[in-house]
Image: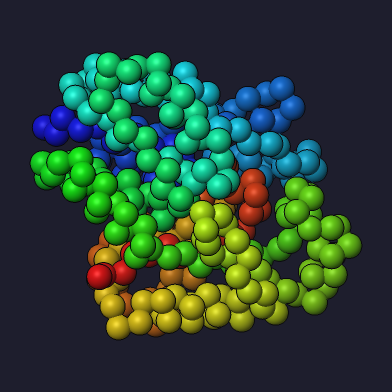
Amino acid sequence: MSTIAIITDTDASLPKAVSKRYGIQQVPITVNFGTEVLKTGIDIDDAGLFERVDREGTLPTTAAPAPGDFTTAYDNAFENGAETVLCFCVSSEISATYGAAVAARQTMPERDIQVVDTLNLTMGQGYMVLAAAEAAKGGKPVPEILSIVDQIRARSQMYAVLPTLKYLAMSGRVGSLAAGFADVISIKPILTVRDGKLDLLERVRTLKKAWKRAIELSKEAVGTNKVEQMSIVHVNAESEAKEFYNQLSQVVSFSGEVLFAELTPGLSVHSGAGMVGVCFVVSE
């Protein structure tokens, strides 16, 4: 049994079954409807989030876990026999989660805890966490684990398509008039992770063409390399995610296990329902 425990947050989009398999604790990002505080993966998921958003006509806010949530996770790890804790947090460019994890560490100066800003999110972050867990299980020392994680970040990529700008308009990220116009002419944004943020990469007309372009971008990013890891992420769009993968698999080869993962509410509240995309890690 490894003496190194791995902790992350729910913005890593790791399915619960995968976290359980690797013994990874996920500290939940919170979603706030007014004064009601809901924990991702415990009180709410993507389906429940958007059922309520569509019913109430308003988006909730999100918040980083409190430092005490990380303190509890650290305590659990040490109580279960860990000698070292490695905590991998969603990018500090989009969340205060990293700061909360650091604040919790500072209350336990006698413990060996390292907090890492992944500068990544969703399964890009998730694959960094999984690589750390596998390396720890294999008995690798902390410096080598952190080096492996850095390499995974450098070799990971994500492309995702939004079918509607409705939810971005609700969030105030685009004006209502602009969102309405974009819907009329069927413009579908393609998103990627850039500089630690979920960012707009391209605008494509029609969902069919946007999917095709996201797949083309994936093929270009893979190039002559092999795909080591692949996941299809989605927001309350399981059937669409499967169809997207069917199209992607005709262009990008991958022989391993493909994970189908919810984006999770801490992120999906910003993208909106119906998003489908791919995260992958290429070989060196």
Confirm whether residue 258 shows in the render. no
- Residue drawn at x 47%, y 36% is 98
Side (left or right) of 166 relative to 247: right
Q: Where's residue 265, x and y in %?
A: 57, 42
Q: Where's residue 84, x and y in %?
A: 22, 28
Residue 202 lies in quadrant: bottom right
In the picture, which quadrant includes the C terminus? Answer: bottom left
Side (left or right) of 8 relative to 164: left
Residue 163 lies in quadrant: bottom right
Confirm whether residue 3 shows in the render. yes
For the view shown, which residue lies furthest in the right direction? 177
- Residue drawn at x 67%, y 43% is 51
Q: Where's residue 127, x and y in %?
A: 34, 53
Colouring style: rainbow
Side (left or right) of 242 relative to 154: right
Q: Where's residue 39, x and y in %?
A: 54, 29
- Residue drawn at x 24%, y 53% is 148
Quick check: 24 above or below 274? above
